[in-house]
Image (spheres, coloured by chain):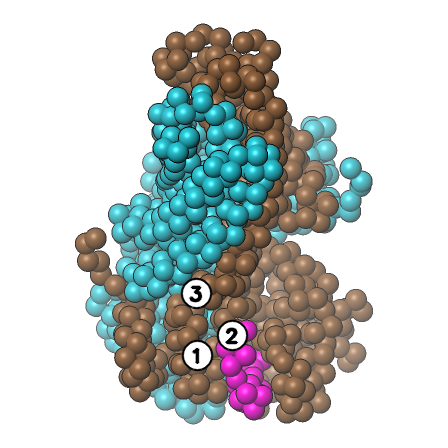
Chain colours: A cyan, B brown
Amino acid sequence: MAEVELTTFEVSLKNLMIALEASNLDEAKAQIKELHPGEISRLLEALQPKDRSILWPSIGSSIQGEVLKEVSEDVQSQLISEMSVDTLVKATEKLDTDDLADIVPNLPESAVHSLLLTLDFKHREHLDKILSYPENSAGGLMNTDFITVRPDVTIRAVTRYLRLLKEMPVDTDQVFVVDRNYNYLGSLLITTILTEEPEQTILSLINSDHSKPISAETDESEVALLFEERNLISAPVIDENNQLVGRITIDDVVDVIRDQAEHSVMSMVGLDEDEDVFAPIFLSSRRRSIWLGVNLVTAFIAVYFIGLFEATLQQKIALAILMPVVASMGGIAGTQTLIIVTRGIATGRVSAANIRVLINKEVAVSVLNGIIWSIVIALITYYWFSDLLLSFIIAVAIIVNLVVAAFSGAFLPLLLTRLKIDPALAGGVILTTITDVIGFVAFLGLAALFI
Amino acid sequence: MAEVELTTFEVSLKNLMIALEASNLDEAKAQIKELHPGEISRLLEALQPKDRSILWPSIGSSIQGEVLKEVSEDVQSQLISEMSVDTLVKATEKLDTDDLADIVPNLPESAVHSLLLTLDFKHREHLDKILSYPENSAGGLMNTDFITVRPDVTIRAVTRYLRLLKEMPVDTDQVFVVDRNYNYLGSLLITTILTEEPEQTILSLINSDHSKPISAETDESEVALLFEERNLISAPVIDENNQLVGRITIDDVVDVIRDQAEHSVMSMVGLDEDEDVFAPIFLSSRRRSIWLGVNLVTAFIAVYFIGLFEATLQQKIALAILMPVVASMGGIAGTQTLIIVTRGIATGRVSAANIRVLINKEVAVSVLNGIIWSIVIALITYYWFSDLLLSFIIAVAIIVNLVVAAFSGAFLPLLLTRLKIDPALAGGVILTTITDVIGFVAFLGLAALFI
C-alpha cells in the first residue's frame, strides 16, 4: 500500500504507541502534556487496554475527571476499575453535576460514598435531583449550573450582579427569569444584556423564541430534535409544577445525537454503541457470539424451509444454485425500505399518521423494481440453463419476494416501536428471516408445483 | 393494533393531513401559523410531495427562507422548483450568508442572478468567499457574521461598542481579537466581557482554550470532531495567511454530525442521506434499482461458484440445504468487524497507526467464535442428517469463513478509505460477496474432496 500522509492525531497516536511500546513513560507523558482532555480521550480510546492502564495513572487528577466524562462507557469502566477510591474522588469532585451524574452509576459504592461526603449540601441535592430522573430523559441530561434573575430588575442591575459573580457556567447563552417561587417565566439572551439600554427592565425583554421550557420527563431524542429544529445552545428544564430545575446545554445534546447515530449503525449487527474497539478478546467474543447465535437460529429457520423441498431440489439442481439470488434480492430491497422507515421514525418524519401513504409507496416501488429485475434475472437464467419454465418461476418468485419485502420493511419498524422493541436492533434480523423464507418457499414451492 | 398516544408533532401532522385531504387550505394554514420554521420543515418532510405543493405557497416568504435552509436537499429541490424567481429572491435575501451559500447551488441561474443584485457589495463578497471553498470544508461551513475587536482596547470600550451594535449575530459566544491587518490573535468569551472589570484590556483576557482557529481547508468531519472534543459553540476560521475569514457555529456542526450519521446508515443499502422519504415512485424506484443491480451482480458471482460444484450437490442434496448457513454466519461476523472498524475510522479511534493491533484482535475473536459455533452447527447437522463427515466439513467451513470474514472486515475499510472509496457505501457489499464466495467454496470444495 502506498504511504499516505498521517493526520496530526494519527502522528500523536503513533508516537504515543512507540513510546509505550518502548516503556518510555516520560516520553509518553510529554506527548499528551499539552493536549485538551477531549484529545486525550480520543487517544485513550485508540489504545489497547493494557496501554491505557500504563498511561492513565500519569495523567493529573483534574484532567482525569474531564477525560472520564468524554470517553465511551466501556473505556470509562476500565479506567474507573483501575483507580483507587481516593484518586476517583479527586478526579470527579470538580465535575459539573450533570457529568457527575453520568459517571456515578459506574462508580464503586465506596467511591460514591466518599464522593458524596466531599460535596456540599447544595451540590448533593442537585445530584440527587438529576439522578431521580431516567438517564435518557431531559432531567437526566440537565445540569444545575445556571443563572436566574427576577423579572422586575433592570439590565443595569443584572450587569452588576453578573460582574459580582466573576464567572458564569460554561455555555451560558441566556439567563433564566423566575419569580419568587422559582416558577419559570422566560429567558434573556446574554447578548441582549450586552446590547440593550441599561434602564430597560427584564420583563420587557424576555425572549419568546428561546424561552419555551422543556419538561424534565421529555425523552432525550425529543430534546435532540428540539435543539436541532430551533438551533438552541441551551434550554431551561422545568418540573411538573413549572418550577425551573435545570438547564440542558448543546454539548450534551451533541453527545445524544452522536450516540443515537452510533446506536442505529451498531445495533444492526447486534453491537452496542459503547463497545470498546480494543476490548479484550473474551469480552468482544462473548458479545458478538450472542448475535451470531441469533443469526444461527434464523439461518436454520430458513434452511428448514429449504429442507421441505429436498425432493424438488434432487430433481433439478439448478434450483439449489439459483435460490440464493431470490433470497438476497428480497433481503436488499426489504432492508432499503426498513432503513428508510426506521430513520424516518427516528428523525420524526414517519409516524402512525403517515405510514399508510408510505406503505403504498414502498410496495409500488417494489413492484416496479420487481418487474424490471425479474426480467433481467429470467434472461440470465435462460442464458445459463436454457430452461424457460425455470426462468419464469424465478421471475415470479423475485416479484413475490420483493413485494413482501417492501411491505414487511415498511410495517415492521412501526410495529416493533409499538411493542417497545428497538427496530434498529431487531428489524434487520426479522426482516431477512422473512425474505429468506419467502424467497426460498416461493421459488422452490413454485418449482415443486410446475416441474 | 392498540391505540397509542400520539406526540404533539403527530397530532399536528394528522390534523394537517386531514385539512389538506379536505382541501381546507385555511384550516391547514391555521395549523402551521404559530409554528417555528424548524417544525414546519419537519411537517413538510412528513407530507407527500403533492401536499407540500399545496401548502408551500401559503407560507410567508420570510418563513420560507428559514424552512428552505432546514429541509433535506431533496425536499429543498422540490420546493425551490415550485417557486418563481421573485418569491425565491424574497425568501432567501434575508438568510445568513452561510445558509445562502448552501442553497445557492440548488437555485436556478436566473434566481441566483436576481439574488446577487439584491445583495450589497459586502454580502456578495462574503458569499463569493464561502462559495470559493469546497462545500464540505470549514470554509464552506462558515458564516461571515461575527464581531471583531482590537487587542489594545478595554472591556469598557468593547461594552460601549456592543451597545452601539444593538444586535449581535446568533450564537455569538465569543468575539474575535484581530490586529489592524485582520490577523487572528485570539478570542474573548462574551461571558468574560460581562464578568470582568471594565478597565481590563482585551489583550490580558484573551481566551486560550477557545482561541485555536480552524483552517478554512479543514474537512467538515475534522471540524465536527473538534467541536465535540472541545465542546465548542463557535470557532474562528482563518485562511492560509492567518487572516480571520469566518466563524463556524454549533448549529451547522450539528447538521454535519446528523448528516454523517444518516449517511453511514443509509449508504449501507446504497441510499442517499438526502433521500426524500416520500419521493415520487419513479424517482425512488430508479435510485434503489441501482443498488439492487449491484447486489444482483454480487449474487451471481456467488452462485457462479456454487455452479462449479453442481456434481457434488447432485451427489448430496444436504449440501444445498445447509450452504446458506455457512455463508450467512460469515456475513454476520464479517459485518460486525466491518462496522466496528468503519465507525472507528469515522470517529477517529482507528487509523493506520493501530490497525495491525485491531486485525489481530478481530481474527482472534473470530477464531474463538468460529470454534464455539462450528461445534453447535456440527451437532445440529449431525442430529438432522446423521452424517459425521458432513458435520465435520461444515464445522471446518464455518471456521475458515469466520476467520476470512474478520480479516476482510478489518482490512477493507482502511483499504477503501485509502482508495478514496466510501467504506460505508461499498464495504458491506464487497464483504458479503467475499463471505458468500468463501463460504460456498470452502463448504462445497471440502465436500467435493471428501465425499
Q: Is residue A54 left or right of residue B378?
A: right
Same subunit: marks 1 and 3: yes
The answer to whether A240 is drawn above or below residue A317 in the figure is below
Q: Secondary structure at mark 2?
A: helix
Q: Toward which corner of the image does residue B178 lie, by quadrant?
A: bottom right
- Disc nearer the start of the sequence (1/3): 1
Image point (60%, 31%), residue name: B304
Q: Earlier along the polypeptide chain: callout 2 or callout 3?
A: 2
Tell whether B177 sits left or right of A81. right
Q: Chain of mark 3?
A: B
Between the residue at mark 1 and the residue at mark 2, the CA separation in whole angstroms equals: 8 Å
Part of the protein shown in magenta: B77-96
Indicate whether B320 appears above or below B432.
Answer: above
Crowd band around label 3 with a 10 angstrom C-alpha radius: few (<14), some (14–19), many (20+): many
Residue labelled with disc 3: B278
The residue tagged 2 is B78
